[in-house]
Image: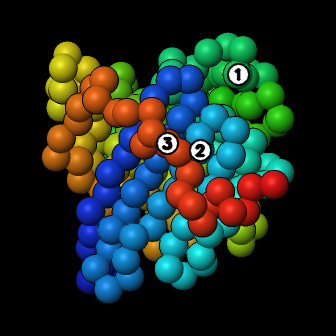
Amino acid sequence: MASSGVSGVVDVYAAKPNLALLKVTIGGIGEVLEGFDGTVGWSVSAITGPMLALGKELDQKKFDAAFDAELHDNARYKSMETLEQTTFENHPAYKVSLTHLDGTEDIEYYDVKTRFRIATVATRESPMGPMKVTVSYGDYKKFADVMVPTTMTQSTMGVQQVLTFTSVEFDKVPPSMFEPPAAIKALIK
């Protein structure tokens, strides 16, 4: 978060069918964990303590954790439609509406020339209520024959976070990685 002089290390893990873990270590703040183990969505931080995702927030965590989400399986959407050719941050882009089965809409932008996704605009539930999130993707590089964005800029509520990925590995995540920590297990009834 360049504007506030805060930096840290981010590790992102994903596995089939819908397992996800985000681990952020920030100097002066500590570790923030956010995960989905296929059933339970959760987060732990020094600021909020351990928390379970419930209701719509849990549904969205499950949706977002789908390992093959980038393939946009028709069964996950009510509709998918290219709305127009426009620009996003000075890039000619196709604007695509993705309406989830629950009616939630995400907007994605794809570069006209490369066809790579360059942005997603979505609203997600949080403990503070619905939040609009804009994520820009760039600096695509090849890792094991897969093109991956190595820069992601996320903007939420006026705060901008820039994530730079230096390495991507495939098929090296042990299933135990997605097991909720003890503080979360204590909350599960």
Between marks 2 and 1 in the image, the one whose residue lies nearer the viewer: 2
| Residue depicted at x 50% and y 23% | 16
Residue carrying label 3? 178
Crowd band around label 3 with a 10 angstrom C-alpha radius: few (<14), some (14–19), many (20+): many
First-in-chain label (2 vs 1): 2
Q: Position of residue 96 (x, y in %)?
A: 58, 29
The foreground one among 20 and 155 is 20
| Residue depicted at x 63% and y 35% | 38
Image quadrant where residue 132 sits: bottom right
Dots 2, 3 in contact, CB < 8 A = yes
Relative horizontal placement of residue 7, taking residue 118 as reference (left or right): left
Q: CA distance from mark 1 to mark 3?
A: 23 Å
First-in-chain label (2 vs 3): 2
Q: Position of residue 84 (x, y in %)?
A: 57, 28
Q: Position of residue 144 (x, y in %)?
A: 18, 20
Relative horizontal placement of residue 113, taking residue 160 as reference (left or right): left
Residue carrying label 2? 36
Q: Secondary structure at mark 1?
A: helix
Q: In this rendering, does residue 180 appear at all?
A: yes
User: How many callouts does the rendering have?
Assistant: 3
- The amino acid marked with disc number 2 is Phe
Q: CA distance from mark 2 to mark 1?
A: 18 Å
Residue carrying label 1? 76
Instruction: Please say if 130 is above or below 98.
Output: below
Image quadrant where residue 91 sits: top left
